[in-house]
Amino acid sequence: MASSWSDHAPSNDPAVNNDILNAVALNYRSLTSIAIEADSVDCLLNMIDCCRDLETIEVYSDRLNLELDDIRAIASLPRLKTLEIRWCLFGEGALAGLERCKGLRRLALGNVSGLDAVLPIIGGRLFSLDIWNCDASTALAPWNRRALFQPGISFPWICK
């Protein structure tokens, strides 16, 4: 049976948030969906290590700086279909790790640069792509449009 967990009311204390998320990861390994505000990359990686059946990950945080290895860890989830990352920072080339997400069908990213290198690789597999506060002129360059505008691909909203 699918199960999900959501952290919509985090504590003001990052250490408390991390303790709660780590306890959830250790005690609910069969989770298939998480929506969290993580205060550390280690906490997110612990969720990924413990909950290998995750199909949906939603991460909201302006305190995370995701690097290539972090994105590759997310991409290592065999059942991952939906990935939403809001307000996180991405290191140079980190988004290239998304090419390993073979089952990814919905991608939602905000405040991201470097999409022009990734979308041609993963775009053909997506059913839905949400982009906000990104450089749409770069992300949707003419050569990307051919790869992305296929039946079933939708762009709910693009800003900027």
Image (cartoon, rainbow, N blue to C red):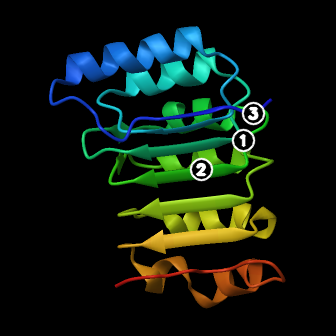
Circle 3 sits on which residue? 2
Label annotation for residue 7? none
Helix, strand or loop at label 1? It is loop
Task: Report if the CB atoms under discs 1 and 2 are less than 8 Å apart.
Answer: yes
Q: Residues within 10 Å of mark 1 (few under 14, many from 20)?
A: many
Which comes before the other along the chain, label 3 or label 2? 3
In the image, taking residue 53 as reference, residue 109 lies left or right, namely left
Q: Nearer the viewer, mark 3 or mark 2?
A: 3
The quadrant of the image that shows the N terminus is top right
Helix, strand or loop at label 3? It is loop
User: Residue 56, located in which quarter of the rendered image?
Assistant: top right
Number of marks in picture: 3
Circle 2 sits on which residue? 83
Q: Position of residue 54 (x, y in %)?
A: 68, 33
Residue 86 to residue 53: above or below: below
Find the distance from the CA under tag 3 to the CA under tag 2.
17 Å
The kind of residue on which mark 1 rests is Leu
Which comes before the other along the chain, label 1 or label 3? 3
Pick out the residue farthest to the bottom: 142
- Image point 43% across, 14% down: which residue? 22
Find the distance from the CA under tag 1 to the CA under tag 2.
7 Å
Residue 46 to residue 155: above or below: above
Q: Nearer the viewer, residue 142 or 20?
A: 20
Q: Position of residue 84 (x, y in %)?
A: 52, 53
The kind of residue on which mark 3 rests is Ala
In the image, taking residue 153 as reference, residue 20 lies left or right, namely left
Q: Position of residue 92 (x, y in %)?
A: 40, 48
